[in-house]
Amino acid sequence: MKTTKTMAVRLINIGFNNIVVDQRIVSVVNPASSPVKRLIEVARKRGSLIDATCGRRTRSVIITDSNHVILSALQPETIGERFQQKIEKAEKKVLLTSTATNQYKLRKRK
Protein backbone atom coordinates (compact mmCIF):
# COMPACT_ATOMS: atom_id res chain seq x y z
CA MET A 1 0.00 0.00 0.00
CA LYS A 2 1.44 3.32 -1.04
CA THR A 3 0.75 6.37 1.08
CA THR A 4 1.00 9.84 -0.33
CA LYS A 5 1.54 12.92 1.71
CA THR A 6 -0.52 15.84 0.48
CA MET A 7 0.87 19.32 0.94
CA ALA A 8 -1.35 22.34 1.20
CA VAL A 9 -0.94 24.83 -1.60
CA ARG A 10 -0.01 28.24 -0.24
CA LEU A 11 -0.63 31.24 -2.45
CA ILE A 12 1.37 34.47 -2.26
CA ASN A 13 -0.18 37.75 -3.38
CA ILE A 14 2.42 39.56 -5.50
CA GLY A 15 0.35 42.72 -5.92
CA PHE A 16 -2.85 43.80 -7.65
CA ASN A 17 -4.56 40.49 -6.83
CA ASN A 18 -1.95 38.50 -8.75
CA ILE A 19 -1.09 35.27 -7.01
CA VAL A 20 1.78 32.77 -7.26
CA VAL A 21 2.06 29.33 -5.66
CA ASP A 22 4.83 29.65 -3.07
CA GLN A 23 6.31 26.21 -3.80
CA ARG A 24 7.09 27.28 -7.38
CA ILE A 25 9.16 30.34 -6.38
CA VAL A 26 12.92 29.88 -6.66
CA SER A 27 13.98 33.46 -5.93
CA VAL A 28 12.79 37.04 -5.61
CA VAL A 29 15.37 39.57 -6.78
CA ASN A 30 15.78 43.28 -7.37
CA PRO A 31 15.54 44.22 -11.08
CA ALA A 32 18.32 46.84 -10.98
CA SER A 33 21.31 44.66 -11.86
CA SER A 34 22.44 44.00 -15.42
CA PRO A 35 22.20 40.19 -15.20
CA VAL A 36 18.57 40.44 -14.06
CA LYS A 37 17.79 42.89 -16.87
CA ARG A 38 19.29 40.41 -19.36
CA LEU A 39 17.25 37.62 -17.78
CA ILE A 40 14.08 39.68 -18.28
CA GLU A 41 14.92 40.29 -21.95
CA VAL A 42 15.67 36.61 -22.56
CA ALA A 43 12.38 35.63 -20.91
CA ARG A 44 10.53 38.19 -23.03
CA LYS A 45 11.99 36.73 -26.24
CA ARG A 46 11.33 33.17 -25.05
CA GLY A 47 7.72 34.00 -24.15
CA SER A 48 8.05 33.11 -20.49
CA LEU A 49 7.79 36.64 -19.06
CA ILE A 50 4.73 37.46 -16.97
CA ASP A 51 4.16 41.16 -16.26
CA ALA A 52 2.09 41.50 -13.07
CA THR A 53 2.90 45.17 -12.49
CA CYS A 54 -0.34 46.58 -13.97
CA GLY A 55 1.62 49.40 -15.59
CA ARG A 56 3.56 50.30 -12.45
CA ARG A 57 7.33 50.33 -12.06
CA THR A 58 8.93 46.91 -11.68
CA ARG A 59 10.35 46.58 -8.17
CA SER A 60 10.96 42.85 -7.99
CA VAL A 61 11.52 39.92 -10.29
CA ILE A 62 10.25 36.49 -9.29
CA ILE A 63 11.92 33.46 -10.85
CA THR A 64 10.01 30.18 -10.78
CA ASP A 65 11.09 26.56 -11.05
CA SER A 66 9.48 26.39 -14.52
CA ASN A 67 11.84 29.17 -15.73
CA HIS A 68 9.06 31.74 -15.86
CA VAL A 69 10.04 35.27 -14.92
CA ILE A 70 7.35 37.32 -13.16
CA LEU A 71 7.58 41.09 -12.78
CA SER A 72 5.96 42.59 -9.69
CA ALA A 73 5.41 46.14 -8.47
CA LEU A 74 6.05 45.09 -4.85
CA GLN A 75 9.44 45.30 -3.16
CA PRO A 76 11.29 41.97 -2.71
CA GLU A 77 11.17 42.51 1.06
CA THR A 78 7.37 42.75 0.99
CA ILE A 79 7.03 39.52 -0.96
CA GLY A 80 9.52 37.87 1.41
CA GLU A 81 7.49 38.98 4.42
CA ARG A 82 4.30 37.61 2.90
CA PHE A 83 6.08 34.36 2.15
CA GLN A 84 7.31 34.13 5.75
CA GLN A 85 3.85 34.93 7.15
CA LYS A 86 2.33 32.10 5.12
CA ILE A 87 4.94 29.65 6.42
CA GLU A 88 4.42 30.72 10.04
CA LYS A 89 0.64 30.50 9.67
CA ALA A 90 0.89 26.99 8.19
CA GLU A 91 3.26 25.84 10.96
CA LYS A 92 0.90 27.23 13.61
CA LYS A 93 -2.03 25.42 12.00
CA VAL A 94 -0.11 22.12 11.95
CA LEU A 95 0.87 22.61 15.59
CA LEU A 96 -2.73 23.32 16.62
CA THR A 97 -3.99 20.32 14.66
CA SER A 98 -1.42 17.95 16.16
CA THR A 99 -2.13 19.28 19.67
CA ALA A 100 -5.87 18.73 19.21
CA THR A 101 -5.24 15.23 17.88
CA ASN A 102 -3.00 14.39 20.85
CA GLN A 103 -5.60 15.70 23.29
CA TYR A 104 -8.25 13.57 21.60
CA LYS A 105 -6.05 10.47 21.89
CA LEU A 106 -5.40 11.17 25.58
CA ARG A 107 -9.13 11.55 26.29
CA LYS A 108 -9.82 8.34 24.41
CA ARG A 109 -7.31 6.41 26.56
CA LYS A 110 -8.93 7.43 29.86
Image (cartoon, helix red, strand yellow):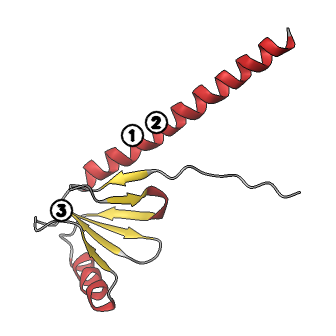
Look at 42% across and 63% down and name the residue there.
25
Quarter of the picture containing the C terminus is top right
Mark 1 secondary-structure assignment: helix
Report if the CB atoms under discs 1 and 2 are less than 8 Å apart. yes
Q: Quadrant of residue 34?
A: bottom left
Q: Position of residue 22 (x, y in %)?
A: 44, 56
The reply, left or right, for residue 33 in relation to residue 4 is left
The mark nearer the N terminus, 3 or 2, is 3
Badge 1 density bin: few <14, some 14–19, many ≥20, Cα 10 Å = few
- Residue at the far left: name it: 56
Q: Position of residue 10 (x, y in %)?
A: 46, 50
Front of the two marks 3 and 2 = 2
The kind of residue on which mark 1 rests is Gln
- Residue at the far top: name it: 110
Look at 28% across and 56% down and name the residue there.
14
Instruction: Tell me the CA gap for discs 1 and 2.
Output: 6 Å
The mark nearer the N terminus, 1 or 3, is 3
| Residue placed under numbered mark 3 in the picture | 59
Instruction: Tell me the CA gap for discs 1 and 3.
Output: 20 Å
| Residue placed under numbered mark 1 in the picture | 85
| Residue placed under numbered mark 2 in the picture | 89
**Dot label at residue 47:** none
Look at 51% across and 39% down and name the residue there.
90
Q: Position of residue 51 (x, y in %)?
A: 23, 72
Report if the CB atoms under discs 1 and 3 are less than 8 Å apart. no
- Which residue is nearer to you in this view: 37 or 14? 14
